[in-house]
Image (cartoon, rainbow, N blue to C red):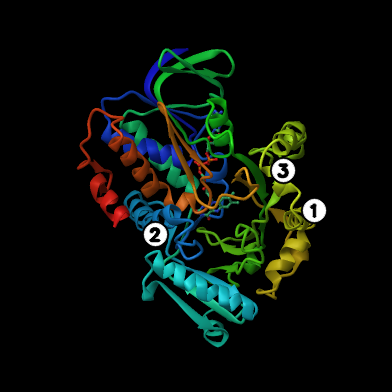
Amino acid sequence: MKDNFDLVIVGGGILGTSLSYFLSFLNKSKKIAVIEQENNVAQHTSGRNTGKVHAPYLYNPEKKKLFANAAFHGYEMWKEYAKLQNLPFKEDGVIEVALDEKGIKVLEKYLKWGKQNGLEEKDIELIDKKELKKIEPEIKCESALHVHRDGSTDYSILTKSILKDSEKNGINFLFNKKITQIKKNNDKWEIIIDENHKIFADFLINAAGGQAIDIAHSVGVAKNLTDVHFRGEYWKTPKKYHNLTKTSVYSVPEFPDYPFLDPHWIVRVDGSCEIGPNAVPVFSPYGYDTTENIKEFIPKILEMLGSGARKTIFDKQFQELAFSEIQSSMSKSVMVERVKKFLPKINPKEITVKGTAGIRSSVINEKGKFVPDVILLEEDKSFHILNYNSPGATGALPFSAHIINELHKSGLFENNETEVQCGPWKFNEIIEKLEK
Ligand SMILES: Cc1cc2nc3c(=O)[nH]c(=O)nc-3n(C[C@H](O)[C@H](O)[C@H](O)COP(=O)(O)OP(=O)(O)OC[C@H]3O[C@@H](n4cnc5c(N)ncnc54)[C@H](O)[C@@H]3O)c2cc1C
């Protein structure tokens, strides 16, 4: 195999596929490929998440501006797209509960953030426990945020649908192709696949999810950053629990620095219910099982000790937290008990079936701190998207439109026309909404 492309996207997750979707309408004359190591799109985090279309109330508008904005617009876009294609999307809202006074203060802060991030009065309200009892009689709490503009979907189905649209418009999806090395050769990227085939590209977009940092490092970018991986595990609940609540229930995170912790009560788009995810430290973005973790243990520990992550792994709070998450992985009841605090009816003994785990890769800077927002790095002939975490699936469409627009502005493409119809949307109108 020897092939030349104008542009190569590394990674067929929801991000790489959404990027290809807009490019397929805007740059019809260019030869573009998405390279994916698996046999289909959304085989990793994009197809292994909670399936929530998140309202942006959890995100500090100063620290997670881009994510919050993309999530706000992503809700409308996925809703419209799903309706058009007849794909699953439920406007079922979410409830965030506080179990004590401290938690109520956090809810007040979330309400403020939600409104700063674009939510209106009708989208989000703070209610007391009596009001909540009328809506969800089984939930026990002191106060709750009832968020109406929040939904459920199946991101694996959505990603597969935008893959089809992109392919129809001429994007090449190269499946079962793992990129093992990337080199610059006479102003072109030489991309080595499975250690022996070569592909050439003028421009490279790195949307490799849990391997985005490794891909960036391999071309000399973001050497000051590293990442740590957390496996988010789920437990399926028996049918008798499926009508316990109408809505998914989240609780105020115990450690605000680690908001991805604290398992939720999840009502999936198909009506089934699960508990999860926790966040167990693992050694690979594909560390779903022990074999992969053992294989990656030594290289990952050596990498962490030589980087900012060293400070994190020796941090006392991180150690306590990692320990409690490992406990929750080993003992199902530890995890279920967390949810039982606000949903007392559930019984750990009746919950016996594991769900599909997904892995979150969080970037750590040289000071050993988790980086809160997505990191965008434009280098010579390459663009890297790092730390693309929750609510990344919700915001994938508007976020991708933003990236493509930035690349257009920097003159990457000959055709700078943006009044182009991309599926149900005009590209320039998406950008105008995002920049408002
Ligand atoms: C437990 C959990 C729950 C979540 N819940 C939600 C939620 O409810 N709502 C929400 O909005 N967000 C949620 N998220 C976040 C969301 O799922 C992610 O932000 C999003 O899926 C990231 O998409 P991605 O395309 O960047 O990464 P991925 O889906 O991981 O895709 C990256 C792709 O790159 C490929 N790749 C990597 N390296 C190579 C290589 N060398 N060669 C070839 N291919 C390569 C991989 O195979 C992979 O398919 C959740 C995340 C987790 C972990």
User: How far is the residue under mark 1 from the one under mark 3?
Assistant: 25 Å
Q: Which residue is mark 1?
A: 330
- From the viewer's perspective, is the residue at label 1 or at label 2 nearer? 2
Foreground residue, 208 or 320?
320
- From the viewer's perspective, is the residue at label 1 or at label 3 nearer? 3
Picture coordinates of residue 386, whole percent (x, y): 51, 41
Name the mark on residue 72.
Answer: 2
Q: How many neighbours does mark 1 have within 10 angstroms: few (below 14), some (14-19), or many (20 or more)?
A: few
Sequence order check: which comes first, mark 1 or mark 2?
2
Picture coordinates of residue 248, whole percent (x, y): 55, 66
Sequence order check: which comes first, mark 3 or mark 2?
2
Vertical placement of 69 versus 417: above or below?
A: below
Q: Which residue is mark 3?
A: 310
User: Is residue 401 visible in this depiction of the protein?
Assistant: yes
Q: Is residue 320 left or right of residue 170?
A: right
Name the mark on residue 406.
Answer: none
